[in-house]
Image (cartoon, rainbow, N blue to C red):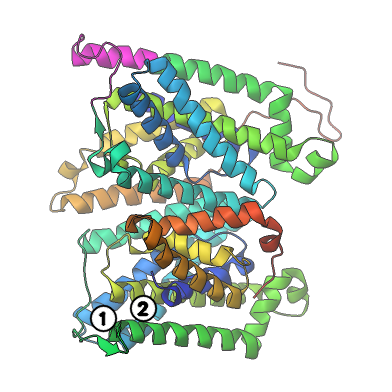
């Protein structure tokens, strides 16, 4: 999967992790939910790609907030790992809700087919350019939000030191809810962008989860600009791996990257800087 | 069915060593299970190794994989191990699906020999194999229960409860974690080997992440940290899986894929509910006889 698309769910995961402090595996199922929300809007509602992406963001974000409130939040006191297990179970449950409604068939968006642009011997697909633009817009928006708005600052404060943020009067619960909405929304956009590139099915999100984790990991879990850089590197590495490996092993590149980083310089990623 | 319960009990026991006692999580259980199954199958078919040797190889291969992964993440927080094990199980499935020269890809490996298969009727074979699995389960159970009661198990629990204190007390925490993880992986690999010889056919489809959830559910329902609980939970989960296999009759008007979805949803949902409302499971972990502050030590039972 191309780096910029990968960056979107990776940023979502990276944003959630330092605030809620457990690896939220439901990023995968929310990516699927977003992809199917966009699919319904596109095929049944007849909307073009851009508003569908916006809808994917909202639906996946809302689903993320609800799932967290109802399922994961009450488990958080039992520890990060218990919550991570519950997240895996929740992911499987959500995936099966999608499967129950839509079945296992591969589905594609109803989009006009456009001829590739040819320029100086390169072939460029307009759809890919559009996906790239959407991904870039989403990333820029999130980055600007975190860097410049008051709400963004309070999110960073909670990630850095929840107790201190609480003393300063920041409502950690509200921040957690917001972070979930934005993070899972981004996952949903990521799922939809993957769908625009290829097809979707209930496993769409799960299939890319390794690449998403790798993108968040190879630099510094918790830093959004670095997650973007990480995603680009994983994207390029996955494409380059085609020179040496069978295409099926593309997703194994992410795993190899995680293992390599953890073995070679664990200190580089140990420093958990928030955003 | 009873044989499957035995295999799941082995898996749950393997998980109990690291999650119940050591407090480390393995979300790629099915990956180690798959490694064991494939190694045993290939040892039998390509090398012509006897079953016992194949099983030993299976356990050793899974242990080596677990050792490497625990070593890579031993210094880091548990999150990393969770992610890396999940990744491992996916990569194992990828390799099994794509290295066709070795694993015959998605077609799977068939014709894995079983003890006296062919000379016995299928019913007799099932019975023989059940005895075999129960014997294996008994041996593993005795070893892990012994481990749990030993000073080694005490250190593991100390690490689970407070890693820093254990370290201050002079325990080599990293070595303990890596060893325990490798040991647990060996049990998972053994279960995989037994599975391969039992079904005589393995394919990547059998090793999906859902299997991991079954095992975690079994241990959580039974009682995390309690070996009897692991066995009990495995029996309950297998009973549930087998009884819902006929669920198509109860849920008229649903497509097969929808019935499968309902079934998988139920598994996920029940794990969440148990974690939420009965985290200690049916048989909670037996607490060691220690004096709590102010109270005298109860007599040794």
Magenta region, residue range? B111-132
Q: Is residue A121 above or below residue B232?
A: below
Q: CA distance from mark 1 to mark 2?
A: 9 Å
Let me know if residue B225 appears in the view: no
The correct choice, above or below, for A8 with respect to B55 in the image is below
Q: Residue at x 66, y 52 (%)?
A: B77
Looking at the image, which is closer to me, A26 or A232?
A: A232
Q: Chain of mark 2?
A: A
SS at badge 2: helix
Indicate left or right for A135 with A72 as reference: left
Residue B116 part of the magenta-drawn span: yes
Q: State the residue lying farthest toward the front.
A: A121
Q: Viewed as shown, does residue A73 lie left or right of A160? A: left
Dot 1: element: helix
Q: Residue at x 27, y 67 (%)?
A: A200
**Residue A230 versus residue B213: which sits nearer the camera?**
A230
Q: Is residue B250 magenta?
A: no
Q: How many marks?
A: 2
Quick one: quadrant of the N terminus of chain A? bottom left
Residue drawn 66% across and 62% down? Answer: A269
Dots 1 and 2: beta carbons under 8 Å?
Answer: yes
Chain hosting mark 1: A
Instruction: Give coordinates of residue B173: x percent, y percent.
Output: 74, 39
Look at mark 2 in the image and give the residue it sits on: A56
Q: Quadrant of residue A188?
A: bottom left
In percent of width and height, residue A182 lies at: 50, 78
Instruction: Say whether disc 1 or disc 2 marks the residue closer to the N-terminus.
Output: 1
Which numbered tag is attached to residue A275? none
Provide the residue designation for mark 1: A41
């Amino acid at each position: 999967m191309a780096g910029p698309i990968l960056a979107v769910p990776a940023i979502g995961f990276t944003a959630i992790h330092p605030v809620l402090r457990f690896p939220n595996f439901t990023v995968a199922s929310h990516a699927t939910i977003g992809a199917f929300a966009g699919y319904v809007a596109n095929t049944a509602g007849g909307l073009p790609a851009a508003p569908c992406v916006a809808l994917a963001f909202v639906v996946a974000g809302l689903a993320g907030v609800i799932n967290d409130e109802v399922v994961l939040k009450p488990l958080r006191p039992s520890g990060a790992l218990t919550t991570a297990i519950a997240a895996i179970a929740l992911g499987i449950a959500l995936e099966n809700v999608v499967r129950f409604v839509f079945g296992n068939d591969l589905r594609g968006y109803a989009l006009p087919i456009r001829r590739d642009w040819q320029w100086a011997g390169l072939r460029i697909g307009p759809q890919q350019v559009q996906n790239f633009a959407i991904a870039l817009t989403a990333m820029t928006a999130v980055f600007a939000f975190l860097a410049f708005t008051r709400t963004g600052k309070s999110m960073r404060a909670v990630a850095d030191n929840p107790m201190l943020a609480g003393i300063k009067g920041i409502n950690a619960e509200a921040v957690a809810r917001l972070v979930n909405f934005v993070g899972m929304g981004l996952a949903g956009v990521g799922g939809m962008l993957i769908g625009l590139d290829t097809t979707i099915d209930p496993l769409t999100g799960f299939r890319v989860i390794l690449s998403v984790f790798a993108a968040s990991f190879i630099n510094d879990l918790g830093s959004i600009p670095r997650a973007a850089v990480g995603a680009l590197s994983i994207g390029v590495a996955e494409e380059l791996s085609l020179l040496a490996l069978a295409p099926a092993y593309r997703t194994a590149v992410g795993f190899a990257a995680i293992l390599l980083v953890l073995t070679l310089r664990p200190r580089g990623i140990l420093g958990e800087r928030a955003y | 069915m009873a044989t499957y319960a035995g295999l799941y009990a082995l898996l749950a026991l393997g998980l109990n060593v690291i999650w119940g006692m050591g407090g480390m999580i393995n979300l790629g259980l099915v990956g180690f299970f798959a490694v064991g199954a494939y190694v045993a199958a290939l040892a039998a078919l390509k090398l012509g190794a006897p079953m016992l040797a194949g099983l030993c190889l299976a356990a050793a291969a899974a242990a080596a994989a677990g050792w490497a992964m625990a070593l890579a993440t031993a210094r880091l927080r548990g999150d990393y191990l969770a992610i890396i094990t999940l990744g491992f199980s996916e990569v194992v499935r990828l390799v099994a699906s794509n290295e066709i020269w070795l694993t015959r890809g998605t077609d799977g490996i068939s014709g894995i020999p079983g003890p006296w298969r062919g000379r016995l009727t299928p019913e007799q074979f099932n019975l023989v194999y059940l005895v075999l699995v129960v014997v294996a389960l008994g041996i593993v159970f005795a070893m892990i229960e012994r481990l749990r009661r030993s000073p080694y198990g005490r250190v593991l629990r100390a690490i689970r409860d407070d890693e820093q204190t254990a370290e201050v007390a002079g325990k080599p925490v990293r070595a303990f974690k890596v060893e325990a993880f490798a040991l647990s992986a060996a049990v998972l690999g053994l279960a995989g080997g037994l599975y391969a010889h039992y079904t005589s056919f393995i394919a990547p489809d059998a090793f999906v992440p859902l299997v991991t959830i079954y095992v975690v559910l079994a241990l959580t329902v039974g009682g995390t940290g309690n070996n009897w609980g692991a066995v009990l939970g495995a029996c309950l989960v297998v009973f549930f899986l087998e009884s819902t296999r006929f669920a198509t009759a109860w849920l008229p008007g649903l497509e097969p894929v929808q019935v499968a979805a309902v079934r998988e949803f139920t598994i996920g949902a029940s794990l969440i509910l148990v974690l939420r409302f009965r985290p200690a499971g049916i048989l909670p972990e037996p607490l060691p006889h220690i004096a709590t502050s102010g109270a005298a030590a109860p007599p040794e039972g």
